[in-house]
Amino acid sequence: MAPSQTSTLPLDAESSAALARTGLEYALVDADGDGFPPFLTSVARGFLGEEPTPEQIESSRSALRARRLTGVFDRAGEQPDAPVATVDSWISELTVSPERTLPIWSISAVTVAPTHRRRGIATAMLTGELRTAAAAGYALAGLTVTEATIYGRWGFSPAAWASHVVVDTRRARWTGPVAPGRLDFVPRESLPERLTAVHERMRVRRPGAVPGWEGRWRGIAGLTPEAPDAKKVRAVAYRDPEGVERGILVYTIAEREEYTEHELQIRALFADGDEALAALWRFALEHDLVGRVTAELQPAVPPVQWMVSDRRAVTATLTDHHWLRVLDVPGALASRRYSGPLDLVFGVSDPLGFADGAWRVRVDDSGEAAVERSDAEPDVRMPVGSLASLLLGGVRATELSTAGLVHGDAAHLGAVDGAFAPAAAPLLDIWY
Ligand SMILES: CC(C)(COP(=O)(O)OP(=O)(O)OC[C@H]1O[C@@H](n2cnc3c(N)ncnc32)[C@H](O)[C@@H]1OP(=O)(O)O)[C@@H](O)C(=O)NCCC(=O)NCCS
């Protein structure tokens, strides 16, 4: 299915009926129609943002045109055309193992008006998204979250983590590789194209990653109307000795009272290769008048800590970042490549039904999986969320077992750990 076709899929009948029983209407919103400005206004309110200006509405309209926009309307209210709840979704592509991707149903803009909370609206919207995605044949749904307490109840669970990195540059003398290429400042207007080029090459190698999109890159570049510090955004590109652009660093510098203690805030550091990574981090850490460098959405163990004299100059705070929901067990598990053979029956409990049952998971010596329903007694048992967390290998079955989130004997859990070990630690380097 082409990504833009999701907006023509019918609304989920079960959610329509559930909302109608409470006097609410579930409806698709056309990005080019009159319903779009109130939709965007409701989303902005949900995320505690300012009311969008006409310029922002136009900019978002083009960014969201490829998405399926759904609203919940309370027609008896003061503003019947302004949705009391919103969600948007689109088809993205998840890297499941290096150079292997799987289409996923991505969800964002989940809001419920404070006047309408705790009435089951989010439940209707999220289960509606999942049923629509499953019916359209998608094996996974995904989202990034503002709070970790919300989405587990619908079977989502973290599958990729990211850390917020802070570097004290006075302690961090560069001891890393010296890159042979060159750095140049590049204009902000050129960034969407440049970020796309580098990120597209990187993301297919990193499990947990998805592609960015024009609006995301424009935001990072400070080219969207709402970007407050737009004019302070600076960017440098790294070119290798052959002249190929291999990395981009986008940053702002926040001024501090002490003139040599300013903070360089990385908005994106994308590197296609180790040399580009070293060159861009070194540039950031050695920037004059900077005492601190910060970067979000970095690997759990950031490589920069191995490139400086004092490792403790680098602190990394880890958080869950990419949450996945398994809708089709064979589709999800057979998509990736594994690190070792396996032949076990997984028992999955899923209150929403999509993944529920016993599944025989066989991985051959080449790392390819075949997964089918089974009547056999499961060797390992888990709730559906645990399956999503195991999928990319970011957490081990033995670790989840410690928390009672996977059950099985030690030999079986060890076999799962061996097979699911990832080729690279899963990471999602953007928000969506
Ligand atoms: C989070 C939010 C979408 C929930 O909407 P809602 O319609 O009130 O949710 P529901 O009535 O369907 O409640 C579903 C369940 O989630 C719980 N819940 C709702 N919001 C929650 C929160 N923020 N933290 C923890 N639990 C929450 C409810 O108590 C209910 O629990 P139950 O299943 O045990 O009964 C809404 O509070 C919101 O819009 N928040 C601001 C925007 C936001 O954070 N969006 C998420 C972006 S990732």
Image: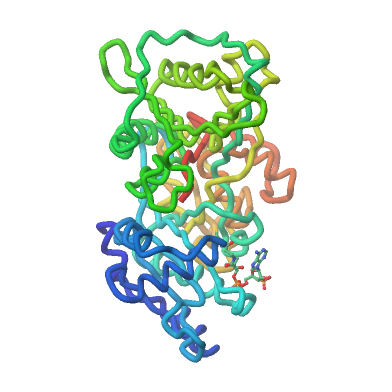
Q: Which residue is located at x 48 percent, y 47 percent? A: 228
**The N terminus is located in which quarter?**
bottom left
Is residue 102 visible in the rendered image? The answer is no
Relative depth, front residue between 160 and 29: 29
Relative depth, front residue between 57 and 364: 57
Relative depth, front residue between 111 and 423: 111
Asked if residue 412 lies left or right of residue 269, the reply is: right
Residue 423: x, y in percent?
48, 29
Asked if residue 302 is positioned above or below residue 231 in the image, the reply reads: above
Asked if residue 148 is positioned above or below residue 84 in the image, the reply reads: above
Is residue 186 visible in the rendered image? The answer is yes
Asked if residue 116 lies left or right of residue 216, the reply is: right
Asked if residue 155 lies left or right of residue 137, the reply is: right
Residue 317: x, y in percent?
66, 35
Q: Which residue is located at x 50 percent, y 91 percent? A: 76
Relative depth, front residue between 179 and 379: 179
